[in-house]
Amino acid sequence: MSREKAKKVIKQMAENARKKDGKKLPLGKALRNAGYSDHYANSPKKLLGTETFKELLGIFLPEAKVIKTHSELMDASEIQHYVFPQKGRGKKAKDVEDDKIKAIVESVPGCKLIYIKKDFYGKIAFYQAPDNRSRERAIDMAYKLRGSFAAEEIKLTRPFEGMTDEELMAERQKLQDMLNKKPRK
């Protein structure tokens, strides 16, 4: 029975991942809908750490598929366009030459010209450009998975470390004496 419940939860998680409208079912609610108790649903990490869940996750979300999709995300690009207006006005108006447009577009790192279309106002260059937002998310994920995002390192100094009990008591007494002294006027 618990395997069937876990399957329902994983299917809901996969459905959440496909949703783009932001109306995702919280994991706790998915656990309740699958038949888990409120106590278990309030602590979803209990399920995520079980062998059954890990086994089913490997079936529904195979490592090879994750790696392939992540790789595609790291190389994500999008189609964009830019209008190169004519130089001059009226009969003397001139279009920017195609080879110059290509040189301009491809001078931007990662951009590749697809085609150029003539328009009333000039020429429109359609080009492939890196989808930096998707790439950034993919890189963040990779760093997190590798553990490279370390918390900010804080160095603690312990001035009393290594002192004997007698030395600590003497230091305590000095501090108490200092606190008990009355301020001079």
Image (spheres, rainbow, N blue to C red):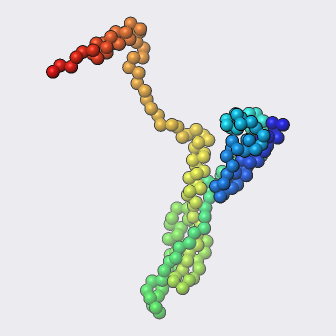
Image position, residue 145 (x, y; %) = 62, 41
Image position, residue 185 (x, y; %) = 15, 21
120 lies left or right of 179: right
Which quadrant of the view contains residue 28?
top right
Asked whether the viewer can see residue 50, the reply is yes
Which quadrant of the view contains residue 98?
bottom right
Residue drawn at the location 76% of the way across and 44% of the way down: 33
Residue drawn at the location 43% of the way across and 86% of the way down: 88
As drawn, the residue found furthest toward the front would be: 38
As drawn, the residue found furthest toward the right would be: 1
Who is closer to the viewer here, 31 or 85? 31
133 lies left or right of 19: left
User: In the rendered image of this protein, does residue 133 appear above or below residue 181?
Assistant: below
Q: Quadrant of the N terminus?
A: top right
Residue drawn at the location 67% of the way across and 35% of the way down: 43
Residue drawn at the location 48% of the way across and 86% of the way down: 94
As drawn, the residue found furthest toward the top would be: 166
Image position, residue 121 (x, y; %) = 51, 83
Image position, residue 87 (x, y; %) = 45, 83
As drawn, the residue found furthest toward the left would be: 185
Who is closer to the viewer here, 108 or 31? 31
User: In the rendered image of this protein, does residue 102 appear above or below residue 169?
Assistant: below
137 lies left or right of 181: right
31 lies left or right of 81: right
Asked whether the viewer can see residue 56, the reply is no
